[in-house]
Image (cartoon, coloured by chain):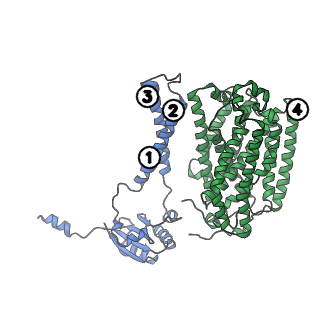
Amino acid sequence: MSDAKLTAVEAPPARWGLLAEFESVEKLLAAAEAVRKAGYTKFDAHSPIPVHGLDEAMGIRPTRLPLVVLLGGAAGCAGGLLLQWWTNAVDYPFMISGKPLFGLPAAIPVVFESTVLLAALGAVGGLFVANGWPQLFHPVLRSERFRAATDDTFFISIEAADPRFEDGATRALLESLGSRAVEEVER
Amino acid sequence: MDTQLPDIFQEKRLLGEAGDTFWRRALAVGLIALAASVALGFAAGDHGRSFFFAYAVSFAYVLSLSLGALFFVVLQHLTRAGWSVVVRRVAEGVAATLPVLALLFVPILIGLHQLYHWSHAEAVAADHLLHGKSPYLNVPFFVVRWVLYAVTWGLTVRAFVGRSLAQDASGAPELSLEMQKRAAPAMLLFGLTLTFASIDLLMSLDAHWFSTIFGVYFFAGSVVGFFALLAVLMLMLQRAGYLRHAVTVEHYHDIGKLLFAFIVFWAYIGFSQYMLYWYANIPEETGWFLRRQTNGWGWVSLLLLFGHFVLPFVALLSRAPKRNRKVLGAVAAWMLVVHWVDLYWIALPELRPQDPLPHLVDLTTAVGLVGVWLASAAFIMRKRSLVAERDPRLAESLGFENA
Protein backbone atom coordinates (compact mmCIF):
# COMPACT_ATOMS: atom_id res chain seq x y z
CA MET A 1 0.00 0.00 0.00
CA SER A 2 1.56 3.28 -1.04
CA ASP A 3 1.34 6.54 0.94
CA ALA A 4 -0.06 8.39 -2.01
CA LYS A 5 -3.13 6.15 -2.07
CA LEU A 6 -3.77 6.65 1.63
CA THR A 7 -3.74 10.44 1.30
CA ALA A 8 -6.16 10.26 -1.57
CA VAL A 9 -8.68 8.28 0.49
CA GLU A 10 -8.42 10.55 3.49
CA ALA A 11 -8.71 13.84 1.56
CA PRO A 12 -11.96 15.71 2.40
CA PRO A 13 -14.65 15.19 -0.25
CA ALA A 14 -14.66 17.97 -2.82
CA ARG A 15 -17.57 20.33 -2.43
CA TRP A 16 -19.82 20.87 -5.46
CA GLY A 17 -22.04 23.62 -4.14
CA LEU A 18 -25.15 24.49 -2.15
CA LEU A 19 -28.71 23.25 -2.61
CA ALA A 20 -31.56 25.34 -1.23
CA GLU A 21 -35.12 24.12 -0.85
CA PHE A 22 -38.19 26.30 -1.47
CA GLU A 23 -41.83 25.49 -0.83
CA SER A 24 -43.57 27.48 -3.55
CA VAL A 25 -43.28 28.72 -7.13
CA GLU A 26 -43.47 32.34 -5.96
CA LYS A 27 -40.53 31.89 -3.58
CA LEU A 28 -38.55 30.06 -6.27
CA LEU A 29 -39.09 32.86 -8.78
CA ALA A 30 -38.20 35.59 -6.26
CA ALA A 31 -35.11 33.65 -5.14
CA ALA A 32 -33.94 32.95 -8.72
CA GLU A 33 -34.19 36.63 -9.52
CA ALA A 34 -32.36 37.65 -6.34
CA VAL A 35 -29.57 35.12 -6.97
CA ARG A 36 -29.15 36.43 -10.52
CA LYS A 37 -29.12 40.03 -9.30
CA ALA A 38 -26.50 39.13 -6.68
CA GLY A 39 -24.25 38.34 -9.65
CA TYR A 40 -24.20 34.55 -9.63
CA THR A 41 -23.84 32.84 -13.01
CA LYS A 42 -23.36 29.16 -12.19
CA PHE A 43 -26.69 28.39 -10.61
CA ASP A 44 -29.74 26.40 -11.58
CA ALA A 45 -33.38 26.06 -10.59
CA HIS A 46 -35.15 22.70 -10.22
CA SER A 47 -38.91 22.29 -10.36
CA PRO A 48 -41.37 19.40 -10.71
CA ILE A 49 -43.54 21.50 -13.05
CA PRO A 50 -42.83 23.97 -15.87
CA VAL A 51 -42.75 27.45 -14.33
CA HIS A 52 -43.68 30.39 -16.55
CA GLY A 53 -41.29 33.30 -16.10
CA LEU A 54 -38.47 31.21 -14.64
CA ASP A 55 -36.22 31.79 -17.66
CA GLU A 56 -36.62 35.53 -17.29
CA ALA A 57 -36.09 35.38 -13.51
CA MET A 58 -32.89 33.36 -13.97
CA GLY A 59 -31.74 35.53 -16.88
CA ILE A 60 -31.42 32.60 -19.30
CA ARG A 61 -30.92 33.96 -22.81
CA PRO A 62 -33.21 32.66 -25.60
CA THR A 63 -32.11 29.26 -26.86
CA ARG A 64 -30.09 29.00 -30.05
CA LEU A 65 -31.64 25.60 -30.79
CA PRO A 66 -33.85 26.98 -33.62
CA LEU A 67 -30.69 27.94 -35.50
CA VAL A 68 -29.39 24.37 -35.19
CA VAL A 69 -32.75 23.08 -36.48
CA LEU A 70 -32.67 25.53 -39.39
CA LEU A 71 -29.13 24.51 -40.35
CA GLY A 72 -30.11 20.83 -40.06
CA GLY A 73 -33.10 21.42 -42.31
CA ALA A 74 -31.05 23.34 -44.86
CA ALA A 75 -28.40 20.61 -44.89
CA GLY A 76 -31.07 17.94 -45.33
CA CYS A 77 -32.69 19.87 -48.17
CA ALA A 78 -29.39 20.41 -50.01
CA GLY A 79 -28.19 16.88 -49.29
CA GLY A 80 -31.41 15.33 -50.55
CA LEU A 81 -31.25 17.31 -53.77
CA LEU A 82 -27.57 16.55 -54.37
CA LEU A 83 -27.99 12.86 -53.63
CA GLN A 84 -30.80 12.46 -56.14
CA TRP A 85 -29.15 14.59 -58.78
CA TRP A 86 -25.88 12.66 -58.45
CA THR A 87 -27.39 9.17 -58.38
CA ASN A 88 -30.08 9.74 -61.06
CA ALA A 89 -28.50 12.15 -63.50
CA VAL A 90 -24.74 11.64 -63.13
CA ASP A 91 -23.56 8.41 -61.59
CA TYR A 92 -26.14 5.99 -63.02
CA PRO A 93 -28.40 7.75 -65.53
CA PHE A 94 -31.41 5.61 -66.35
CA MET A 95 -34.32 6.74 -68.51
CA ILE A 96 -37.68 5.89 -66.92
CA SER A 97 -40.94 6.46 -68.86
CA GLY A 98 -39.63 9.50 -70.70
CA LYS A 99 -39.13 11.60 -67.59
CA PRO A 100 -36.13 13.92 -67.27
CA LEU A 101 -33.16 12.25 -65.60
CA PHE A 102 -33.40 14.79 -62.83
CA GLY A 103 -36.99 16.01 -62.53
CA LEU A 104 -37.60 18.38 -59.63
CA PRO A 105 -41.20 17.22 -58.86
CA ALA A 106 -39.99 13.64 -58.48
CA ALA A 107 -37.19 14.78 -56.16
CA ILE A 108 -39.39 16.82 -53.82
CA PRO A 109 -40.71 13.94 -51.64
CA VAL A 110 -37.19 12.76 -50.79
CA VAL A 111 -36.03 16.36 -50.25
CA PHE A 112 -38.99 16.91 -47.94
CA GLU A 113 -38.18 13.80 -45.92
CA SER A 114 -34.45 14.49 -45.67
CA THR A 115 -35.16 18.09 -44.65
CA VAL A 116 -37.50 16.95 -41.89
CA LEU A 117 -35.09 14.18 -40.82
CA LEU A 118 -32.03 16.38 -40.40
CA ALA A 119 -34.04 19.22 -38.85
CA ALA A 120 -35.49 16.76 -36.31
CA LEU A 121 -32.09 15.18 -35.62
CA GLY A 122 -30.72 18.71 -35.17
CA ALA A 123 -33.49 19.45 -32.67
CA VAL A 124 -33.04 16.25 -30.66
CA GLY A 125 -29.23 16.18 -30.87
CA GLY A 126 -28.97 19.90 -30.17
CA LEU A 127 -31.28 19.50 -27.18
CA PHE A 128 -29.10 16.75 -25.70
CA VAL A 129 -25.85 18.64 -26.28
CA ALA A 130 -27.27 21.89 -24.91
CA ASN A 131 -28.37 20.04 -21.78
CA GLY A 132 -24.86 18.74 -21.10
CA TRP A 133 -24.99 15.27 -22.67
CA PRO A 134 -23.32 12.85 -22.00
CA GLN A 135 -23.77 13.61 -18.31
CA LEU A 136 -24.91 10.46 -16.56
CA PHE A 137 -24.91 11.83 -13.03
CA HIS A 138 -25.50 15.16 -11.35
CA PRO A 139 -24.17 15.95 -7.85
CA VAL A 140 -27.53 17.23 -6.58
CA LEU A 141 -28.85 13.68 -6.97
CA ARG A 142 -26.81 12.77 -3.87
CA SER A 143 -29.20 14.80 -1.76
CA GLU A 144 -32.01 12.89 -0.05
CA ARG A 145 -34.16 16.03 -0.07
CA PHE A 146 -33.75 16.47 -3.78
CA ARG A 147 -36.06 13.47 -4.39
CA ALA A 148 -38.96 15.84 -3.69
CA ALA A 149 -37.95 17.86 -6.76
CA THR A 150 -40.06 15.44 -8.81
CA ASP A 151 -43.00 15.85 -6.45
CA ASP A 152 -43.84 19.12 -4.71
CA THR A 153 -40.64 20.97 -3.85
CA PHE A 154 -38.54 23.56 -5.65
CA PHE A 155 -34.77 23.98 -5.46
CA ILE A 156 -32.01 26.37 -6.37
CA SER A 157 -28.47 25.07 -6.59
CA ILE A 158 -25.37 27.29 -6.71
CA GLU A 159 -22.05 25.82 -7.74
CA ALA A 160 -18.95 26.38 -5.64
CA ALA A 161 -17.16 27.04 -8.94
CA ASP A 162 -19.12 30.29 -9.31
CA PRO A 163 -16.70 33.24 -8.93
CA ARG A 164 -19.10 34.92 -6.51
CA PHE A 165 -19.42 31.84 -4.31
CA GLU A 166 -18.40 32.44 -0.69
CA ASP A 167 -19.03 29.90 1.99
CA GLY A 168 -20.96 31.87 4.58
CA ALA A 169 -22.30 34.64 2.38
CA THR A 170 -23.90 32.39 -0.22
CA ARG A 171 -25.60 30.28 2.44
CA ALA A 172 -26.82 33.43 4.17
CA LEU A 173 -28.22 34.77 0.91
CA LEU A 174 -30.20 31.59 0.24
CA GLU A 175 -31.53 31.53 3.78
CA SER A 176 -32.54 35.18 3.58
CA LEU A 177 -34.58 34.37 0.45
CA GLY A 178 -36.84 32.10 2.45
CA SER A 179 -35.27 28.72 1.83
CA ARG A 180 -36.65 25.96 4.06
CA ALA A 181 -33.27 24.23 4.18
CA VAL A 182 -29.85 24.85 2.69
CA GLU A 183 -27.47 21.91 2.41
CA GLU A 184 -24.03 21.34 1.06
CA VAL A 185 -23.66 19.01 -1.90
CA GLU A 186 -20.54 16.93 -2.49
CA ARG A 187 -18.97 16.51 -5.84
CA MET B 1 -45.57 35.78 -11.18
CA ASP B 2 -48.40 38.18 -12.02
CA THR B 3 -51.40 35.92 -11.62
CA GLN B 4 -53.91 38.78 -11.84
CA LEU B 5 -56.19 37.95 -14.81
CA PRO B 6 -57.94 40.73 -16.72
CA ASP B 7 -61.62 41.14 -15.75
CA ILE B 8 -63.64 40.26 -18.84
CA PHE B 9 -66.63 42.31 -17.70
CA GLN B 10 -64.47 45.47 -17.70
CA GLU B 11 -63.60 44.95 -21.38
CA LYS B 12 -65.24 46.73 -24.29
CA ARG B 13 -66.93 43.76 -25.90
CA LEU B 14 -70.16 44.95 -27.56
CA LEU B 15 -70.00 46.30 -31.11
CA GLY B 16 -72.72 48.83 -30.31
CA GLU B 17 -73.08 51.85 -32.56
CA ALA B 18 -69.79 51.23 -34.31
CA GLY B 19 -71.18 47.84 -35.36
CA ASP B 20 -74.39 49.42 -36.67
CA THR B 21 -72.44 51.98 -38.69
CA PHE B 22 -70.16 49.27 -40.00
CA TRP B 23 -72.79 46.83 -41.18
CA ARG B 24 -74.82 49.56 -42.87
CA ARG B 25 -71.80 50.88 -44.73
CA ALA B 26 -70.47 47.42 -45.64
CA LEU B 27 -73.91 46.39 -46.89
CA ALA B 28 -74.25 49.56 -48.98
CA VAL B 29 -70.78 49.14 -50.51
CA GLY B 30 -71.45 45.45 -51.12
CA LEU B 31 -74.81 45.97 -52.81
CA ILE B 32 -73.50 48.80 -54.99
CA ALA B 33 -70.52 46.68 -56.03
CA LEU B 34 -72.79 43.70 -56.78
CA ALA B 35 -75.11 45.92 -58.85
CA ALA B 36 -72.08 47.21 -60.75
CA SER B 37 -70.93 43.61 -61.28
CA VAL B 38 -74.30 42.65 -62.78
CA ALA B 39 -74.11 45.68 -65.09
CA LEU B 40 -70.55 44.78 -66.10
CA GLY B 41 -71.71 41.22 -66.66
CA PHE B 42 -74.44 42.34 -69.06
CA ALA B 43 -72.04 44.72 -70.79
CA ALA B 44 -69.58 41.89 -71.41
CA GLY B 45 -72.06 40.34 -73.83
CA ASP B 46 -71.12 36.72 -73.05
CA HIS B 47 -74.53 35.67 -71.68
CA GLY B 48 -73.31 36.57 -68.18
CA ARG B 49 -70.57 33.98 -68.15
CA SER B 50 -67.85 36.33 -66.88
CA PHE B 51 -70.19 37.59 -64.16
CA PHE B 52 -71.16 34.11 -62.99
CA PHE B 53 -67.54 32.91 -62.95
CA ALA B 54 -66.54 36.00 -60.96
CA TYR B 55 -69.46 35.31 -58.63
CA ALA B 56 -68.49 31.64 -58.21
CA VAL B 57 -64.90 32.59 -57.28
CA SER B 58 -65.87 35.17 -54.68
CA PHE B 59 -68.75 33.06 -53.37
CA ALA B 60 -66.26 30.20 -52.91
CA TYR B 61 -64.02 32.73 -51.13
CA VAL B 62 -66.53 33.86 -48.49
CA LEU B 63 -67.89 30.32 -48.17
CA SER B 64 -64.39 28.95 -47.56
CA LEU B 65 -63.72 31.54 -44.84
CA SER B 66 -67.02 30.79 -43.08
CA LEU B 67 -66.40 27.04 -43.34
CA GLY B 68 -62.87 27.57 -42.00
CA ALA B 69 -64.43 29.37 -39.04
CA LEU B 70 -66.94 26.56 -38.52
CA PHE B 71 -64.08 24.05 -38.58
CA PHE B 72 -62.17 26.08 -35.99
CA VAL B 73 -65.16 26.33 -33.65
CA VAL B 74 -65.94 22.61 -33.82
CA LEU B 75 -62.25 21.74 -33.45
CA GLN B 76 -61.97 23.75 -30.22
CA HIS B 77 -64.74 21.65 -28.67
CA LEU B 78 -63.42 18.42 -30.14
CA THR B 79 -60.01 19.01 -28.54
CA ARG B 80 -61.41 20.66 -25.39
CA ALA B 81 -59.16 23.62 -26.13
CA GLY B 82 -58.68 26.22 -23.42
CA TRP B 83 -56.33 28.76 -25.02
CA SER B 84 -58.76 29.82 -27.72
CA VAL B 85 -61.82 30.83 -25.68
CA VAL B 86 -61.09 34.59 -26.00
CA VAL B 87 -60.99 34.42 -29.81
CA ARG B 88 -63.66 31.76 -30.37
CA ARG B 89 -66.65 34.09 -30.37
CA VAL B 90 -65.29 36.10 -33.30
CA ALA B 91 -64.89 32.82 -35.21
CA GLU B 92 -68.46 31.93 -34.23
CA GLY B 93 -69.61 35.24 -35.68
CA VAL B 94 -67.90 34.42 -38.99
CA ALA B 95 -69.37 30.89 -39.04
CA ALA B 96 -72.82 32.23 -38.22
CA THR B 97 -72.95 33.85 -41.68
CA LEU B 98 -73.45 30.41 -43.28
CA PRO B 99 -77.27 30.74 -43.41
CA VAL B 100 -76.80 34.09 -45.23
CA LEU B 101 -74.52 32.32 -47.69
CA ALA B 102 -77.39 29.94 -48.46
CA LEU B 103 -79.23 32.97 -49.87
CA LEU B 104 -76.14 34.20 -51.70
CA PHE B 105 -75.95 30.76 -53.35
CA VAL B 106 -79.09 31.48 -55.40
CA PRO B 107 -77.21 33.32 -58.21
CA ILE B 108 -75.08 30.17 -58.70
CA LEU B 109 -78.31 28.26 -59.39
CA ILE B 110 -79.41 30.98 -61.81
CA GLY B 111 -76.06 30.78 -63.61
CA LEU B 112 -75.88 27.00 -63.61
CA HIS B 113 -75.86 26.70 -67.40
CA GLN B 114 -73.31 29.49 -67.76
CA LEU B 115 -70.97 27.88 -65.24
CA TYR B 116 -71.28 24.14 -65.69
CA HIS B 117 -70.82 22.30 -68.95
CA TRP B 118 -72.35 19.16 -67.41
CA SER B 119 -75.68 20.94 -66.87
CA HIS B 120 -76.40 20.91 -70.63
CA ALA B 121 -78.34 17.77 -71.60
CA GLU B 122 -77.17 17.88 -75.22
CA ALA B 123 -73.49 18.15 -74.13
CA VAL B 124 -73.89 15.14 -71.82
CA ALA B 125 -75.58 13.11 -74.57
CA ALA B 126 -72.70 13.79 -76.96
CA ASP B 127 -69.91 13.15 -74.45
CA HIS B 128 -69.23 9.65 -73.16
CA LEU B 129 -67.29 10.84 -70.11
CA LEU B 130 -69.94 13.36 -69.04
CA HIS B 131 -72.58 10.70 -69.62
CA GLY B 132 -70.67 8.37 -67.29
CA LYS B 133 -70.53 11.07 -64.62
CA SER B 134 -74.16 12.12 -65.05
CA PRO B 135 -75.58 9.98 -62.20
CA TYR B 136 -73.74 12.41 -59.90
CA LEU B 137 -73.40 15.53 -62.04
CA ASN B 138 -77.01 16.35 -62.90
CA VAL B 139 -79.05 19.41 -62.00
CA PRO B 140 -81.67 17.89 -59.64
CA PHE B 141 -79.07 15.99 -57.59
CA PHE B 142 -76.85 19.11 -57.51
CA VAL B 143 -79.70 21.11 -55.96
CA VAL B 144 -80.51 18.31 -53.50
CA ARG B 145 -76.88 18.16 -52.41
CA TRP B 146 -76.70 21.92 -51.78
CA VAL B 147 -79.88 21.75 -49.72
CA LEU B 148 -78.21 19.01 -47.66
CA TYR B 149 -75.02 21.07 -47.22
CA ALA B 150 -77.01 24.13 -46.17
CA VAL B 151 -79.07 22.13 -43.65
CA THR B 152 -75.95 20.44 -42.23
CA TRP B 153 -74.06 23.71 -41.84
CA GLY B 154 -77.09 25.48 -40.46
CA LEU B 155 -77.62 22.80 -37.83
CA THR B 156 -73.92 22.83 -36.94
CA VAL B 157 -74.01 26.60 -36.48
CA ARG B 158 -77.08 26.25 -34.27
CA ALA B 159 -75.52 23.45 -32.21
CA PHE B 160 -72.29 25.33 -31.51
CA VAL B 161 -72.84 29.08 -31.93
CA GLY B 162 -76.33 28.82 -30.40
CA ARG B 163 -75.11 26.99 -27.30
CA SER B 164 -72.14 29.31 -26.91
CA LEU B 165 -74.46 32.34 -26.93
CA ALA B 166 -76.85 30.62 -24.53
CA GLN B 167 -73.90 30.13 -22.18
CA ASP B 168 -73.37 33.90 -22.06
CA ALA B 169 -76.77 34.17 -20.41
CA SER B 170 -76.84 31.06 -18.22
CA GLY B 171 -73.17 30.32 -17.60
CA ALA B 172 -74.11 26.64 -17.54
CA PRO B 173 -70.96 24.49 -17.90
CA GLU B 174 -73.11 21.56 -19.17
CA LEU B 175 -73.43 23.42 -22.47
CA SER B 176 -69.68 22.96 -23.02
CA LEU B 177 -70.04 19.24 -22.40
CA GLU B 178 -72.98 19.04 -24.83
CA MET B 179 -70.91 20.76 -27.50
CA GLN B 180 -68.01 18.44 -26.81
CA LYS B 181 -70.30 15.44 -27.36
CA ARG B 182 -71.55 16.83 -30.68
CA ALA B 183 -68.10 17.87 -31.91
CA ALA B 184 -66.99 14.50 -33.30
CA PRO B 185 -70.08 13.74 -35.42
CA ALA B 186 -70.17 17.40 -36.50
CA MET B 187 -66.58 17.13 -37.66
CA LEU B 188 -67.38 14.00 -39.70
CA LEU B 189 -70.33 15.73 -41.37
CA PHE B 190 -68.21 18.83 -41.93
CA GLY B 191 -65.53 16.80 -43.74
CA LEU B 192 -68.06 15.13 -46.02
CA THR B 193 -70.08 18.27 -46.84
CA LEU B 194 -67.02 20.47 -47.44
CA THR B 195 -65.47 17.87 -49.73
CA PHE B 196 -68.53 17.39 -51.91
CA ALA B 197 -69.38 21.11 -51.88
CA SER B 198 -65.91 21.96 -53.22
CA ILE B 199 -66.22 19.29 -55.90
CA ASP B 200 -69.63 20.63 -56.94
CA LEU B 201 -68.82 24.32 -56.85
CA LEU B 202 -65.27 24.44 -58.23
CA MET B 203 -63.97 21.10 -59.47
CA SER B 204 -66.99 20.37 -61.67
CA LEU B 205 -66.26 23.58 -63.62
CA ASP B 206 -64.06 21.18 -65.58
CA ALA B 207 -66.25 18.10 -65.51
CA HIS B 208 -63.69 16.12 -67.53
CA TRP B 209 -61.10 16.32 -64.79
CA PHE B 210 -60.43 13.80 -62.03
CA SER B 211 -58.90 14.59 -58.65
CA THR B 212 -59.41 12.62 -55.46
CA ILE B 213 -57.57 15.15 -53.30
CA PHE B 214 -59.47 18.25 -54.43
CA GLY B 215 -61.64 18.48 -51.31
CA VAL B 216 -58.59 18.42 -49.05
CA TYR B 217 -56.94 21.11 -51.16
CA PHE B 218 -59.98 23.34 -50.81
CA PHE B 219 -60.11 22.58 -47.08
CA ALA B 220 -56.44 23.49 -46.58
CA GLY B 221 -56.91 26.81 -48.39
CA SER B 222 -60.09 27.52 -46.41
CA VAL B 223 -58.37 27.05 -43.08
CA VAL B 224 -55.37 29.17 -44.16
CA GLY B 225 -57.82 31.89 -45.15
CA PHE B 226 -59.72 31.61 -41.89
CA PHE B 227 -56.68 31.88 -39.59
CA ALA B 228 -55.47 34.86 -41.62
CA LEU B 229 -58.93 36.40 -41.23
CA LEU B 230 -58.97 35.68 -37.49
CA ALA B 231 -55.62 37.41 -37.01
CA VAL B 232 -56.71 40.44 -39.04
CA LEU B 233 -60.11 40.69 -37.31
CA MET B 234 -58.63 40.43 -33.81
CA LEU B 235 -55.99 43.06 -34.62
CA MET B 236 -58.59 45.43 -36.05
CA LEU B 237 -61.02 44.89 -33.16
CA GLN B 238 -58.28 45.46 -30.61
CA ARG B 239 -57.19 48.62 -32.40
CA ALA B 240 -60.76 49.84 -32.12
CA GLY B 241 -60.56 49.21 -28.37
CA TYR B 242 -62.32 45.84 -28.06
CA LEU B 243 -60.91 43.08 -25.83
CA ARG B 244 -57.78 45.14 -25.17
CA HIS B 245 -56.57 43.07 -22.22
CA ALA B 246 -58.20 39.70 -22.88
CA VAL B 247 -56.37 38.93 -26.14
CA THR B 248 -52.60 38.95 -25.73
CA VAL B 249 -49.53 38.26 -27.80
CA GLU B 250 -49.76 34.64 -26.60
CA HIS B 251 -53.03 34.18 -28.50
CA TYR B 252 -51.58 35.80 -31.62
CA HIS B 253 -48.60 33.49 -31.33
CA ASP B 254 -50.93 30.47 -31.42
CA ILE B 255 -52.95 31.86 -34.33
CA GLY B 256 -49.63 32.44 -36.11
CA LYS B 257 -48.52 28.86 -35.46
CA LEU B 258 -51.78 27.48 -36.83
CA LEU B 259 -51.62 29.80 -39.85
CA PHE B 260 -48.06 28.67 -40.53
CA ALA B 261 -48.98 24.99 -40.13
CA PHE B 262 -51.89 25.21 -42.57
CA ILE B 263 -49.80 27.15 -45.09
CA VAL B 264 -47.41 24.18 -45.09
CA PHE B 265 -50.35 21.76 -45.23
CA TRP B 266 -51.81 23.63 -48.22
CA ALA B 267 -48.47 23.36 -50.06
CA TYR B 268 -48.17 19.68 -49.12
CA ILE B 269 -51.63 18.88 -50.50
CA GLY B 270 -51.21 21.07 -53.58
CA PHE B 271 -47.94 19.39 -54.40
CA SER B 272 -49.33 15.91 -53.69
CA GLN B 273 -51.99 16.61 -56.30
CA TYR B 274 -49.53 17.99 -58.82
CA MET B 275 -46.77 15.38 -58.49
CA LEU B 276 -48.93 12.34 -59.20
CA TYR B 277 -50.31 13.94 -62.35
CA TRP B 278 -46.85 14.99 -63.45
CA TYR B 279 -45.57 11.46 -62.87
CA ALA B 280 -48.44 9.50 -64.41
CA ASN B 281 -48.81 11.96 -67.30
CA ILE B 282 -52.30 10.81 -68.32
CA PRO B 283 -53.94 13.36 -70.68
CA GLU B 284 -57.35 13.42 -68.96
CA GLU B 285 -55.60 14.44 -65.74
CA THR B 286 -52.84 16.71 -67.04
CA GLY B 287 -55.13 18.90 -69.16
CA TRP B 288 -56.27 20.77 -66.08
CA PHE B 289 -52.67 21.63 -65.16
CA LEU B 290 -51.70 22.33 -68.78
CA ARG B 291 -54.24 25.16 -68.87
CA ARG B 292 -52.68 26.53 -65.69
CA GLN B 293 -49.14 26.42 -67.09
CA THR B 294 -49.72 28.00 -70.49
CA ASN B 295 -50.86 31.36 -71.90
CA GLY B 296 -49.62 33.30 -68.92
CA TRP B 297 -51.48 31.21 -66.34
CA GLY B 298 -48.07 29.74 -65.41
CA TRP B 299 -47.25 33.08 -63.80
CA VAL B 300 -50.34 32.81 -61.62
CA SER B 301 -49.26 29.27 -60.66
CA LEU B 302 -45.82 30.60 -59.70
CA LEU B 303 -47.43 33.46 -57.78
CA LEU B 304 -49.27 30.81 -55.74
CA LEU B 305 -46.16 28.69 -55.22
CA PHE B 306 -44.14 31.64 -53.93
CA GLY B 307 -46.88 33.92 -52.59
CA HIS B 308 -49.05 31.24 -50.94
CA PHE B 309 -46.17 29.09 -49.67
CA VAL B 310 -42.50 30.12 -49.91
CA LEU B 311 -42.86 33.75 -48.82
CA PRO B 312 -45.20 33.23 -45.84
CA PHE B 313 -43.24 30.09 -44.88
CA VAL B 314 -40.04 32.09 -44.53
CA ALA B 315 -41.85 35.05 -42.97
CA LEU B 316 -43.55 33.02 -40.22
CA LEU B 317 -40.90 30.32 -39.66
CA SER B 318 -39.36 31.61 -36.45
CA ARG B 319 -40.95 32.59 -33.17
CA ALA B 320 -40.47 36.35 -33.21
CA PRO B 321 -42.63 37.26 -36.27
CA LYS B 322 -45.58 35.25 -34.93
CA ARG B 323 -45.41 37.34 -31.74
CA ASN B 324 -45.11 40.63 -33.63
CA ARG B 325 -48.54 42.09 -34.36
CA LYS B 326 -47.35 44.09 -37.35
CA VAL B 327 -45.59 41.22 -39.09
CA LEU B 328 -48.36 38.71 -38.34
CA GLY B 329 -50.98 41.22 -39.48
CA ALA B 330 -49.13 41.92 -42.72
CA VAL B 331 -48.66 38.23 -43.54
CA ALA B 332 -52.30 37.50 -42.64
CA ALA B 333 -53.59 40.31 -44.86
CA TRP B 334 -51.40 39.02 -47.70
CA MET B 335 -52.73 35.48 -47.20
CA LEU B 336 -56.31 36.77 -47.50
CA VAL B 337 -55.38 38.14 -50.93
CA VAL B 338 -53.54 35.05 -52.22
CA HIS B 339 -56.30 32.78 -50.94
CA TRP B 340 -58.62 34.62 -53.34
CA VAL B 341 -56.00 34.24 -56.09
CA ASP B 342 -55.94 30.49 -55.36
CA LEU B 343 -59.70 30.21 -55.97
CA TYR B 344 -59.45 32.47 -59.04
CA TRP B 345 -56.71 30.15 -60.35
CA ILE B 346 -58.98 27.14 -59.82
CA ALA B 347 -61.99 28.59 -61.62
CA LEU B 348 -61.04 31.16 -64.26
CA PRO B 349 -58.81 29.11 -66.59
CA GLU B 350 -62.02 27.23 -67.47
CA LEU B 351 -63.53 30.49 -68.75
CA ARG B 352 -60.53 32.39 -70.10
CA PRO B 353 -57.67 29.96 -70.79
CA GLN B 354 -55.92 32.66 -72.85
CA ASP B 355 -56.18 35.50 -70.34
CA PRO B 356 -54.88 35.23 -66.75
CA LEU B 357 -55.47 38.85 -65.69
CA PRO B 358 -58.61 39.49 -63.65
CA HIS B 359 -61.31 41.64 -65.26
CA LEU B 360 -63.00 44.51 -63.48
CA VAL B 361 -66.08 42.33 -62.84
CA ASP B 362 -63.92 39.85 -60.86
CA LEU B 363 -62.84 42.62 -58.50
CA THR B 364 -66.23 44.31 -58.11
CA THR B 365 -67.88 40.95 -57.39
CA ALA B 366 -65.22 40.23 -54.76
CA VAL B 367 -65.84 43.60 -53.09
CA GLY B 368 -69.59 43.04 -53.34
CA LEU B 369 -69.69 39.58 -51.79
CA VAL B 370 -67.10 40.35 -49.10
CA GLY B 371 -69.04 43.53 -48.24
CA VAL B 372 -72.39 41.79 -47.91
CA TRP B 373 -70.80 38.93 -46.01
CA LEU B 374 -68.94 41.15 -43.52
CA ALA B 375 -72.09 43.21 -43.06
CA SER B 376 -74.06 40.07 -42.20
CA ALA B 377 -71.38 38.99 -39.69
CA ALA B 378 -71.47 42.42 -38.02
CA PHE B 379 -75.28 42.40 -38.08
CA ILE B 380 -75.43 38.99 -36.41
CA MET B 381 -72.92 40.08 -33.74
CA ARG B 382 -74.24 43.61 -33.20
CA LYS B 383 -75.94 42.92 -29.86
CA ARG B 384 -73.75 40.05 -28.73
CA SER B 385 -70.60 39.94 -26.68
CA LEU B 386 -67.41 39.54 -28.73
CA VAL B 387 -66.14 37.02 -26.23
CA ALA B 388 -67.63 33.85 -24.72
CA GLU B 389 -67.68 35.65 -21.39
CA ARG B 390 -69.00 32.85 -19.19
CA ASP B 391 -67.25 29.91 -20.78
CA PRO B 392 -65.91 27.61 -18.03
CA ARG B 393 -62.46 27.66 -19.66
CA LEU B 394 -62.28 31.45 -19.98
CA ALA B 395 -59.79 31.83 -17.10
CA GLU B 396 -57.49 29.29 -18.75
CA SER B 397 -57.59 31.31 -21.94
CA LEU B 398 -57.03 34.64 -20.19
CA GLY B 399 -53.98 33.31 -18.38
CA PHE B 400 -52.62 31.39 -21.37
CA GLU B 401 -48.89 31.50 -22.00
CA ASN B 402 -46.79 29.65 -24.56
CA ALA B 403 -44.14 27.52 -22.89
Tell me whether circle 4 and circle 1 mark residues in contact (CB < 8 Å): no
Residue B133 sits above or below residue B164 on the image: above
Amino acid at circle 2: Ala
Q: Residue B250's quadrant in the figure?
A: bottom right
| Disc 2: which residue | A107
- Local packing at callout 2 (Cα closer than 10 Å; few below 14, some 14-19, many 20+) is some
- Above or below, comparing residue B290 to residue B148 in the picture: above
Q: Secondary structure at mark 2?
A: helix
Report the Cα–Cα distance between label 2 and label 1. 21 Å
The chain whose colour is blue is A
At x 51%, y 56%, the residue is A62
Q: Residue furthest front?
A: B135
Give me the disc on residue A121.
Answer: 1
Q: Secondary structure at mark 1?
A: helix
Q: Is A43 in front, or is B176?
A: B176
Mark in front: 4 vs 1: 4
Place of residue B99 in the rendered image (x, y in percent of width and height, measured from the top left): 78, 51
Counting from the top left corner in percent of width and height, residue A111 is at 50, 37
Task: From the rendered image, report the letter of the chain displayed in green.
Answer: B
Judged from the image, the secondary structure of the residue bearing numbered disc 3 is helix
- What x and y, as percent, mark residue A116? 49, 43
Q: Could you classify mark 3 by the number of other residues whose Cα lies within 10 Å: few (under 14), some (14-19), or many (20 or more)?
A: some
Residue B341 appears in which quarter of the rendering?
top right
Q: CA distance from mark 4 to mark 1?
A: 61 Å
Q: Are marks 3 and 2 in contact (CB under 8 Å)?
A: no
Name which residue type carries label 4.
Ala
Q: Are marks 3 and 2 on the same chain?
A: yes
Q: Are marks 2 and 1 in contact (CB under 8 Å)?
A: no
Please report whichever mark, 3 or 2, sits nearer to the chain's N-terminal start. Answer: 3
